[in-house]
Image (cartoon, rainbow, N blue to C red):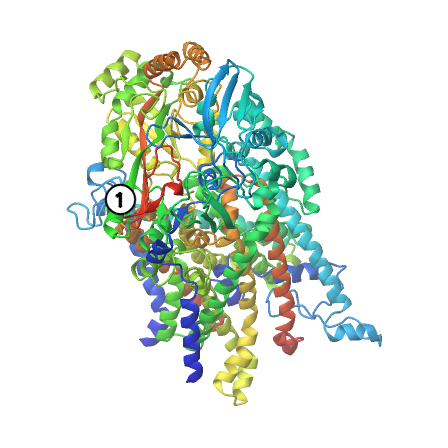
Amino acid sequence: MPRPSASIHELTWAAVAPTAPAAWNTITAELANPTSTVTKPAVTADTDRSRAKDTRPLYSTGHARRRAWAGIGYTPGVRAYLLSRLGQTVLVVFLSLTAVFFLMRLGGDPVLLFLPMDIQAKDLTEFRQRLGFNDPVAVQYGRFIGRAIGGDFGESLRYKQDALGLVLERLPATLYLAVAALGLTFLVAVPVGVLSAVRRGSLFDFFGMGAAVLGQAVPGFWLGLMLIYLFSVKLGWLPTGGTGSARHFVMPCVVLASFYAARMARLTRSSVLDTLNEEFVLTARAKGLAEWVVIAKHALKNSAIPIVTLAGLDTGQLLGGAVITETIFAWPGLGRLTVQALLNRDFPVVLAAVFIFSVTYTLINLVVDLLYGWLDPRTRARAHA
Amino acid sequence: MTRFTTLLTALAVLFGLAASAPAQDRARAKEVVVAFAAEPRTLLPNTIVDWTTNSQIEHIYDRLVDRDPKTYKPMPMLATGWKIVNDTTWEFALRQGVKFHNGEPFNAQSVKATMDYIKDPANKTHYLPRWSQVKEIQIVNDYTVRFITEKPWPGLLDRISESTDFLPMPPRALKDQGPQALLAKPVGTGPFKFVQWVRDERLVLERNPDYWQGAPELNRVTFRYIPEFSARLSALLAGEIDIMKDVPPHAVEMVDRSGKGKVRATVSSRINYLALVNLKPGPLQDVRVRKAIGHSVNVDELIQQVLKGRASKMCGPLSPLNVDYTPGIECLKHDLSRAQALFKEAGVDPTKLQLTLDTPSGRYPLDKDISLAIAAQLQRVGIKTNVVVNEWGTHLDKIKNRTTGDMFYLGWGPALSAQNTIEQLFQASQTYSSYGGNKVIDAKIAQAVTIVDPKKRLEAWADLQRVVQDEAPWVFLWQQHDLYGVASWVEWNPRADEKVWMYEAKLAR
Amino acid sequence: MRTFIGRHGRGVLGLIIAALVVVAAVAAPLLVAQDPLRSDFTVGLKPPGTPGHPLGTDQLGRDLLARVLYGARVALFIGLCCVLLTAVVGGLAGLVAGYYEGWLGAVVMRVADVQLSFPFILLALTINAIVGLGLRNIIVSLSVAGWVVYARVVRGEVLSVKEREFVHAARALGLGRARLLLRHILPNVAPSIVIVGSLQFAQFIVAEAAISFLGFGVQPPTPAWGSMLSESRDYLYVAWWLAAFPGAALAVTALGINLVGDWLRDVLDPKFRV
């Protein structure tokens, strides 16, 4: 049976994250683009993500200003790259909004849902008229895009309040939770993954990865409700939900982290395993460096790329995807608002939320891709092997 | 080592800080925490028709006319008396010496300003259609107003006392600062003053010592929003909240045993029913088939086994709590042989019948389970029922677009007047009706709503009750029981009109 | 022996679990006499150990053991359908995008990007809000939300395989594009698809639970672990068994399948072949 030619990373990667690093996609797109000013590396267009883009300056003239900028990595190549990424962001945001706009229209009549049940037919029509729902869809779309460019996503149908304002109000709470959950994830997943990789095949590996798989297998809401029952009702140690103190963060973070940490631990393990067999690690070992130095200084930094990318993607997912956790723990977050808006067919709020998600997602991707440039030593070491 | 202990201490302090006050502290401070599933959609009164929203707004704003908590008949509140001057004029006498929270006096100006707010299309209030029959408000003097209507509207009193259909707002604040200012800082005449609204988290109100009825016993009311039902129940059991709605029947015993609180129940004015759709061609257009189905469903068994007795059976379209109710309607008995006979008479073979039942899930007590149970009961006469569970929005959509199956489950309430029940649910022109096309009923309804004389009105509605019941448009089910979990230190009883009003809450002695 | 357990222990355990689940699904009618759909209100909410109901009954009096066993069928069905759909659609998309680079590939990847910017669960929810509830619609929404993985992986694979010598040789021999894709590139890409599929299988089963939690679950009275778990929320304090047994079944199944996937990947990884 033919062996998979993709590295172990990509497979683990693809499986444990329902998403994949945008960098692959960007890099190959860049390289395929004949007008790109980015230097094409001497190796073939391989998707091995270790061959990250070479951002060394194109020009080696004596131009002082360019050299100054180049000193911090900001070169014409990078500038063009950033601009193209910005363009891509706008495109993705625009496409997302359009897709959701038309999708939601397919979902049914929104006006009915937020009006009282004793409404008369003619009043219903009047409401639809006043809110602009009687116009043809193309007109509604045009109006929406026109206003959205100016930042006006309309008024929430349910709350009679500015939709974008509502979404932005909820964003901080979700951000705090996402950051805290990610922190816990890193704290738990990376050590477990590294140790499992280093002691591959051992009992620790067995139980560690077993726990990781279990973490992904147990539905979040079930875990959350069990925790509430134990720690709030029976023991009274932690509050059942809401915000207000550090204690309120504990259970939601644990529930969120259980899933993301599981994924990250598995990915860390395979990533480190891959790295541990690379040449430079053997070199470092041959140099007589202590084992932990080898692992921490050399192996870890290089296995960091997929971990960082996964973290970036998870942040994006956490913004809107922590719905279940937010619902169970009464956390006033963006995910919950979006789900409610979806179920209530509150179009303006859904569209405003989608806008925030796309922007955040692409921004995070950009940050991650830039981080690649920094986490680059492997490429520099092997550049033209 | 010292660093470790410092860390431990720091953690201990962090964890100790800002703990939610346990129930005993709250009892001492006379602060009650009420948990709702959702936050208010707005804090502006007279704007959005939504039970959760208005239940909270009602603590800050008063009604013009309230309902008596026992008889549910209209009772004076900010209006002290009323009379009909002529066919198109109602006159209300207003209470004197009442002040808004910002010091403004309550008087006829307030009533007029409120109606202007409602009728202004720019405000897009849901109440505009409800008040469309009112042409204008005339100020007779500072404490007397007249509602002038286009056509005779004897139901105006019902409308104004129905629930939160008319909550007077401060006229000067409305004029000088506009509605947005009132949204940010609500100002009413009610028993509690606005303190703080943390979106989607809590609403905090404090006692109004100058309340015209006498200051409330509680110092503070906090509304918390916990969307997940089991989390709400956990919060009640953990002593974090004091009042929650909709404890399911099977959990009642457990709450009572927990020691943290008791379940207090009330028969609600909200009715649940199984609509038998006659608006589209099918076997259900034959009244005999509908009656046969009514005979096949064992309502008592449903109440006993699924709801554990927590429902009050109904025989007709109106419940005893409805002001226009007339007793004396006979229930359709659970009688399988009669059902079979009726099927035969209609020429329908029940074993070949395949019906679809649309139901929401979680909107009414055990709605999905009841629908499944009804399907199982219909199976006993051989009818195969396909139960389709809808998300609430889809359910409403289907009903409005007449794309539901042959039957659907729905509730209606607070159903306190016949006009808001029968007129809305048995005519083809109405949005949520399942039945229509009966010219006799249409004519009788059109006639009944214009009768001014109360005795004649009652007779007209009684007649309609009988006629509607004869047509078997629904399998008449029950009035739901509202089960509230109430903490042991709070003395509060729920009301059938679903008004959750902390003014009525006291410390348990 | 120890190395065997270390290297293959997890896989064997996973295979055993998976086999048990398949047996439960297939042989459910033989293993339990009760009908999972039959409701009998008089025995509602009975605890485990009641005669005739070893795992207890749910709120409508249906036997829990029967529902858990029949639920295995639904779980496996969902997992299988979703994996097949996503593999086929995503695989094709990836093949096309990888092989025919240029605007077609770019379009596919842009669509994937747009879809990825939307959180997974919200996407599934939006689709369900449009197409409705039910088993078939859950499969649709999960598949639509999940095809992107395959597209990316396959595309990456295709891009690298494309440069290999035997492909160049085949092209030089004048082999048509379609044949090239099907007969040469696809077999090399297949193992990745298989591995990703095995790991996604369990994710889909767990995702069904998440969707049911939000109210878009499988229609009653069909027993599905996810919707059973979701319904059990209301009865958490009075009937713990309604959450415990379906939850355990779900977790164990997902565990088993994940272990198998992990093992497959370990075994197929060229780097660790001695």
User: Which residue occupies the foreground of this view, C42 or B34?
Assistant: B34
Secondary-structure class at tag 1 = helix
Image quarter hosting the C terminus of chain C: bottom left
Residue A46 is situated, as x and y percent measured from the top left of the image, at 62, 65
Q: Circle 1: is it few (<14), some (14-19), or many (20+) Cα within 10 Å? A: some
- For disc 1, the marked residue is B252
Q: Nearer the viewer, residue C27 or B317?
A: B317
Nearest the viewer among A254 and B411 is B411
Task: Please state the chain letter of the residue tagged with numbered disc 1 in the rendered image.
Answer: B
Does residue C239 appear to the left or right of B167 in the view shown? Answer: left
Asked if one can make out residue C63 in the rendered structure from this viewpoint, the answer is yes
The residue lying furthest to the left in this view is: C51
- Is B160 on the left-hand or right-hand side of C93? left
Percent from the top left, x then y, of residue C38? Answer: 25, 37
Relative vertical location of residue B97 with respect to residue A220 in this rendering, above or below: above
Picture residue at 62% right of the left edge, 45% below the top: A97
